[in-house]
Amino acid sequence: MEDRITAKEVRAGFESGIINLIDAEEYFGDGVACKIGSGTLSNWFYFAGHEGELMTAKEYLQNVPMDDIVNEIVDALEDFRDGDEFDHDEWLFYRWLIAEGISNDSKED
């Protein structure tokens, strides 16, 4: 497995449903966030900067091209990868969730 999460993997994660945009207010935040995983095996994070804090997930998807969303998520994930030990562990969790979600999706085809 590559030591990064690629735009191709993030797109595949959206297609498989393992990656979603959510309204952070569901989790006591503001604006749009990225959720990776499902149920208890999931976590969310902000990725869209100030602009994202002012929109719901639906508004963000309607107003920002998917390629831009994917690139913003990849950038945020790279920040986790390059961060301290706690951030890097969180990145490893996201990498595992995405790999498992993509793998399970391809098994269902």
Image (cartoon, rainbow, N blue to C red):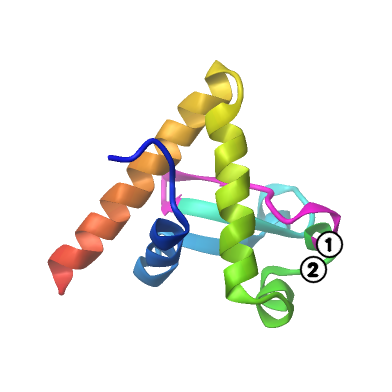
At label 1, the amino acid type is Glu
Q: Secondary structure at mark 1?
A: helix
Question: Which residue: 39% across, 35% down?
Answer: 3
Q: Secondary structure at mark 2?
A: loop
Q: Give the side of residue 94 with respect to residue 23, left or right.
A: left
> Magenta span has 10?
no
Question: Which residue: 62% across, 36% down?
Answer: 79
**Rendered view: 92 above or below 77:** above
Question: Which residue: 15% across, 74% down?
Answer: 109
Crowdedness of circle 2 by 10 Å Cα count: few (<14), some, many (20+)?
Answer: some
Q: Nearer the viewer, residue 6 or 25?
A: 6
At label 2, the amino acid type is Met
User: Which residue position is annotated with label 2?
Assistant: 55
Where does the magenta region start and end? 37-51
Residue 55, horizontal then vertical, whole percent: 79, 68
User: Which residue position is annotated with label 1?
Assistant: 51
Residue 104, horizontal then vertical, whole percent: 21, 58
Question: Which residue: 39% across, 71% down?
Answer: 15
Where residue 69 sits, quadrant-wise, is: bottom right
Q: Which mark is residue 8?
A: none
Q: Nearer the viewer, residue 12 or 2?
A: 2
Label 2 or label 1, whichever lies nearer to me, is 1
Measure how far apart labels 2 and 1 are at the Cα level: 7 Å
Query: Can you name the residue that lies furthest to the top here?
Result: 85
Q: Which quarter of the rendered picture does the N terminus lie within?
A: top left
Q: Give the side of residue 77 with respect to residue 42, left or right.
A: right
